Image (cartoon, rainbow, N blue to C red):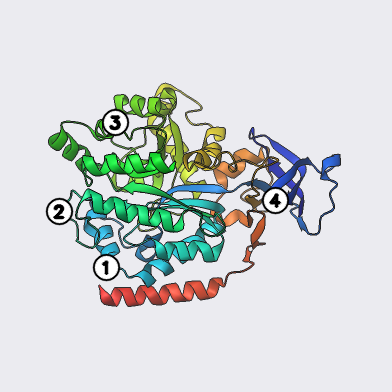
Amino acid sequence: MLITGCSAVMPDASVTEDAAIAVKDGKIVYIGRASEPGAKVGATETLNARGKLAMPGMYDCHTHSVQQLLKGGAVDEPPIVWRRILVPYEASAGDEDRYHAALLYCLQMIRAGVTMFSDAGTVNMEPCVRAVEQTGIQALITQPCWDSDLSLPEAVRDKNAGEALRKAERLYKSFDGYAQGRIRVCFSFSSPDTASPELIRLLGEAAGEYGVRLHTHLCQHIDEVKTCVLKYRMRPAELLESCGVLNDRLLAAHCIHVTDRDIHMMAERGVNIVHCPSSNLTTQGLPKYPAECAAGARVSLGNDGAAVARQDMFYQAQLLKFITHACFATLVYDTVGLSIKEAYEMITINGARALGVRDRLGTLETGKQADIVLVDLRTPALSPSRNILNTVIMAGSANDVSDVLIKGKIILKNREFTGLDEEKILSEGKLRLRKLMEKI
């Protein structure tokens, strides 16, 4: 396939005009100016992308796909929403509810230009596996474990650390590499205050043995910090360090209630910090990006669940940039605070790094997998522009995505799905929601 006529974001975040991208066997074999000799390939299919910007697929590094059937159900609620609303909802949902929720999520993410996501998990992840397989998107999924919080419903709580580990290993052995390699599986404990130190150590050892990520919520709520300090005389990051899991395998979502010492410790250990700005700001607090940047921390972004957050990676990058400037940069007359290049990399290459796929994804370059998103620039919001990347990152949205390729296969073409019945998925999702509401 040859994609022609577009502008293209190169690995250094520069933009090449009048570009061409050649794709063969699911990989990029040429990217550069259409006038160069390398663009002259014998393509069997051509995609005219004139007036569009080609960029890498984006990465939602922390989400809960099951929450698609909880949209609007946790707004204007006091903390802690997850304990009072989200966990009881997930405990009462059935496998068909989870499947249709995951389908809706995958549909929305493909439309938004997300080509891979990391799901923090739910009671049973097999329905999510079915949805990912069906839609063509890529995912890093996990089976969350929690064994120390007796206030949680029995449907989600593990009896002991050994049982939790066995459950997590079953998911890994059953589905890692599934769906032509589009599904990867990692390990997870929900948070430091809901998992015992024994469980955290066991899951960390398993992640190391299998060479995969360890996903958790970290310093999301002040109550989490209080519990760890009172119970273990350690802050959450210190507890994870004592359990041997504060390292570059850790995917740590939120990281709001952190000290400078926490930040430096996480940066030194190579922890992958995932901020979810629209979720964090509603009930938790401000991401401390300038301190993380100064410490050299790895930062990527996530949407979090649809119950409380907008599902749009452009929006997450914009929101983090705005709040960083408003709360930190303007106070010291820092005109950059969080640069456009940093914001762009958070939703592309940094996301790929966080999910452990940077070697084959995250940038448009020869030899990498052809996960390509085309953004339609022919709108009043984006055109005309003096600097395309600046405009797209600051003013673009999920609605501007027109085409999506995953592993070289066109999933969305001119805003139409090529192999999915969008109307049917939406209709069945509405029906599942009505049935679930009757049940609960």
> Which sits earlier in the primary sequence, circle 3 or circle 2?
2
Which label number is shown at residue 150? 2
Q: Categorize mark 2 by other alpha carbons within 10 Å: few (<14), some (14-19), many (20+).
A: few
The residue mark sitting in front, 1 or 4, is 1
The picture places residue 306, in percent across and down from the top left corner, at 39, 58
Which label number is shown at residue 52? 4
> Which sits earlier in the primary sequence, circle 1 or circle 2?
1
Which residue position is annotated with label 3?
241
In three-dimensional space, the C-alpha distance between marks 2 and 4, rounded to whole angstroms, equals 53 Å
> Which sits earlier in the primary sequence, circle 3 or circle 4?
4
Disc 2 vs disc 4: Cβ atoms closer than 8 Å? no
Q: Quadrant of residue 217?
A: top left
Q: Quadrant of residue 175?
A: bottom left
Q: Secondary structure at mark 3?
A: helix
> Which sits earlier in the primary sequence, circle 1 or circle 3?
1
Which residue does the image show at 36% across and 73% down from the upper left?
Answer: 433
Q: Categorize mark 3 by other alpha carbons within 10 Å: few (<14), some (14-19), many (20+).
A: some
